[in-house]
Image (cartoon, rainbow, N blue to C red):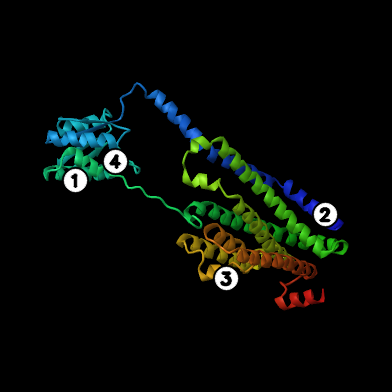
Amino acid sequence: MKQFRKILAYELKNYFTNKVFVGITIFLVIAIAVVMFIPRIVEYFNSEEKAETTESTASVMLIKSDSQEQADIVTQYFAAAFPEYEVKSTTDDLDTIKHSITNQDVECAFVMTGPTEFTYYVNNLTMYDMNCEIATDVLRDVYRVNAMLENGMTLEETTEVMSININAEVESLGKDQIENFFYTYIMIFALYMVILLYGQMVTTNVATEKSSRAMELLITSAKPVAMMFGKVLSSCIAGFIQLLLVFGSAVLFFNLNKSQWGDNMIINSLFNIPMELLIYMLVFFVLGFLIYAFLFGAIGSTATKLEDINTSTMPLTFMFIFAFIVVVTAMSSGSVDNTLMVVCSYVPFTSPMAMFTRIAMSTVPWYEIAASIAILIGSTIGVGVLSAKIYRAGVLMYGTTPKLSAILKAVWKA
């Protein structure tokens, strides 16, 4: 245990004194702060802009029609549909209207050429301009109202028919996939990035020690299990602290700007994770990270030089990417309980993502969850012990890249 504590403390010190590690952490915290404060920044600049344009002409929308009756009806309906505009009917000719738009005296105009036909005039058409689509829907309602009036219905009866409200309620007896989708995806993506990033760091550290022959001295003074668990757990703790700082700052900055975000469904769902799911997230996150970190460490001990690391870790990386693709595909389709996902929920190398996704977006019996966690814990311990033996055997293998049979034979003797 004493050896393990020394190795753990030494490796943690290396992480926390690493300028790249510290720099990335600070950058992510600042980036999160900027994102969370965006509503305040936008509100500030909008208030400045409004203050500058208080005395200027308000946004004006013109309505022109050969029929004054139609112009009055359309103006009335458009005033309700476009509350941000001052909607006015006009009798000016088309050239005058165009001149007013290009001079920015008015923002836009609708020139009616029939009951169901119009031309929309605007100076600069932006990609977010939805006025034409809104006008189409409104004019459809106007046409219906006129048709009802012509068939003998009174204006009150017509208004009542057109303004009827449909009240609908949805009660989910299980999980709301839409509500849980966003933070489930964030967790899966975070696990994906952390495993690949820190897994490669563990592999590189081990391979560097081996190439410098420092590992030969370490292996004679410390047990391989203590060394392997110390290295892996230190990377896990460092990664967890980094994520805690990043996501903790995100929660802090969100609470500071909660009123500015309003009813943003995506942001609110990310920061309203149920405590039960948060616990499951931590369990699967830690176990998933550990099992892959042990494997990355074992692979690093078998590499003969740093240039071989990418080639050596490629099969493990592909296996993890396969799990990620399976889970993301299931999430996108909404079928998180398909046969492949159920099988992946019990396979240790895919269960951290697959089972958590099923828990978050479906109703999974408690015994299936318990079985998946038990298998994952047992597999993590087993892989850790096996990785320590591979680590001890791989230390003494130099020259050409060792074959799998040679590694297994050395492990068996160890």
Q: Secondary structure at mark 1?
A: helix
Quadrant of the frame with the N terminus: bottom right
User: Whole-Å distance between the Cαs marked 3 and 2?
Assistant: 38 Å
Q: Nearer the viewer, mark 1 or mark 2?
A: 1
Mark 4 belongs to which amino acid? Asn
User: Whole-Å distance between the Cαs marked 1 and 2?
Assistant: 79 Å
Which residue position is annotated with label 4? 131
> Which numbered tag is attached to residue 5?
2
Quarter of the rendering containing residue 104: top left
Which of disc 4 and disc 3 is earlier in sequence? 4
Viewer can see residue 229: yes
Q: Nearer the viewer, mark 3 or mark 4?
A: 3
Between residue 268 and residue 50, name the one nearer to us.
268
User: Whole-Å distance between the Cαs marked 4 and 1?
Assistant: 20 Å
> Which numbered tag is attached to residue 343?
3
Residue at 21% across, 37% down: 110
Which residue position is annotated with label 1? 144
Q: Secondary structure at mark 2?
A: helix
